[in-house]
Amino acid sequence: MSGHFEPLPDGGAAVLLDEVEISILRSLAVQLMELIGPGEEAGESESDDLLASVFNDGPSEPPADPVLARFFPDAYGGPDLVPDDDVRAASAEFRRYTENDLRSRKREDALALIRALDTLAPEGGSAELRLKPDECRQWLGALNDLRLAIGTRLEVTDEEDGGELLRLPDSDPRKPMVMAYLWLGGLQETLVESLMG
């Protein structure tokens, strides 16, 4: 089971992770949360006015950071592809009412990953992580976001780029990111297979 997810009888999945893998996953998830940005302000709670939160406006302009632009793309092709004022206005309107929810979900997924890792106490260098079905969904979201972020930074445009990047010399400063990208892909793939099997 080391290095890949296996199905559990309850519909969840399990994976054996060593201390280094736990540390890398946790660090990447923390960085992802920092990139996505803060959630609710301190003092807010679910008991606050739900209606007000529904109509809480998000940003209307696309993010400048390339990773965030991939996470939160324009709904209607963007101004570079469709230079129409009505389309730009519709994209801004769509973003204003959806981006906050998308950011919140991505934060929750990354936080679920961190919390699950924090429960592990590696003995002899490894620990078994057991995820319930709902936790698997959050892990899939977080793993996907982590791969998308790293792939964007590496300028991966398709799966063939990953193979090309693997051939980089060990001296290339991108090599650790490439290895993380490919490793996360393996985790993601085996988690999907575990849930389908």
Image (cartoon, rainbow, N blue to C red):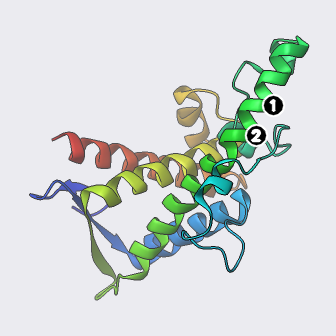
In what element is the residue under mark 2?
Answer: helix
Looking at the rendering, in which quadrant would you find the N terminus?
bottom left
Q: What residue do we see at 52% from left, 62% from top?
A: 108
Judge from the rendering whether residue 43 lies leftward or rightward of residue 21; answer left or right.
Answer: right
Q: Nearer the viewer, residue 86 or 64?
A: 86
Residue 119 % position (x, y):
37, 82
Q: What residue do we see at 59% from left, 73% from top?
A: 45
> Where 124 falls versus 171 (above or below)?
below
State the residue position of label 1: 92
Residue 63 % position (x, y):
82, 43
What is the three-letter code of the residue carrying label 1?
Ala
In what element is the residue under mark 1?
Answer: helix
Residue 98 % position (x, y):
66, 40
Q: What residue do we see at 9% from left, 57% from top?
A: 9
Residue lying furthest left: 9
State the residue position of label 2: 96
Please indicate, yes or no, whether residue 80 appears anywhere in the rendered image: yes
What is the three-letter code of the residue carrying label 2?
Arg
Q: Check if mark 1's residue and mark 2's residue have beta carbons within 8 Å.
A: yes
Q: Nearer the viewer, residue 184 or 63?
A: 63
Please indicate, yes or no, whether residue 170 appears anywhere in the rendered image: no
